[in-house]
Image (cartoon, grey):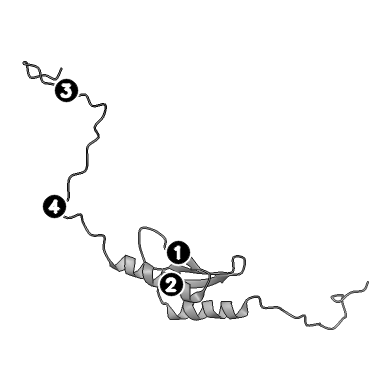
Amino acid sequence: MTGRHRDGQPYASVYQRVWDGPARAEAERLDQAWADWTVFYSLGKRAFYAVASWDGPQLVVVEDLTSEGLEGRMQEAEMARMVPAAPPPHDAPAEPRGRGTGRRRRSSPGGRAA
């Protein structure tokens, strides 16, 4: 039997390629810099992703092709979280009612609708 991994042969080191090393390093840097986020780089999509770790009704995930763009999206998500949804103003018109078919009920002399 021949081959590189047969019994009795010395260990042979094999070159290990690091795919997208700089992008993965940048994702690691962002992960450490942003405490409320988990940041990673997808080799398959070649994009940066961040998942928010704060409690909320929905999972917040943002993505971008660049680390700078991802940071911008993370900032936008944090601002949206901090700004509460404003209630409608008091002078806002009531919601429009459906008009239906256009027929109106007319009251009869007995007080019941016809």
Instruction: Tell which tag, 3 or 2, sits nearer the viewer.
Output: 3
Above or below, 51 against 68 in this view is above
Label 3, label 2: how many angstroms apart (C-alpha)?
A: 59 Å
Label 4, label 2: how many angstroms apart (C-alpha)?
A: 40 Å
Is mark 4 in CB contact (under 8 Å) with mark 2? no
Mark 1 is surrounded, within 10 Å at the Cα level, by few (under 14), some (14 to 19) or many (20 or more) other residues, namely some
Instruction: Tell which tag, 1 or 4, sits nearer the viewer.
Output: 4
Q: Where does residue 56 sit, x and y in percent of width and height?
A: 35, 62
Q: Where does residue 48 sit, x and y in percent of width and height?
A: 52, 70
Label 1, label 4: how many angstroms apart (C-alpha)?
A: 36 Å
Is mark 1 in CB contact (under 8 Å) with mark 2? no
Is mark 4 in CB contact (under 8 Å) with mark 3? no
In this view, the residue farthest toward the front is 102
Mark 2 is surrounded, within 10 Å at the Cα level, by few (under 14), some (14 to 19) or many (20 or more) other residues, namely some
Mark 3 is surrounded, within 10 Å at the Cα level, by few (under 14), some (14 to 19) or many (20 or more) other residues, namely few
Q: Earlier in the sequence, mark 4 or mark 2?
A: 2
Task: Residue 61: give its label.
Answer: 1
Q: Where does residue 98 sit, x and y in percent of width and height?
A: 25, 35
Above or below, 105 against 99 in this view is above
Above or below, 44 against 17 in this view is above
Q: Earlier in the sequence, mark 1 or mark 4?
A: 1
Q: Which residue is mark 3?
A: 105
Q: How many marks?
A: 4
Q: Earlier in the sequence, mark 1 or mark 2?
A: 2
Decide if residue 79 is on the left or right side of residue 52. Answer: left
In the image, what residue occupies the spot 87% across and 81% down? 9
Task: Residue 91: give its label.
Answer: 4
In the image, what residue occupies the spot 88% across and 80% down? 8
Describe the element under mark 3 as helix, strand or loop: loop
Q: Amino acid at mark 1?
A: Val
Q: Amino acid at mark 4?
A: Asp
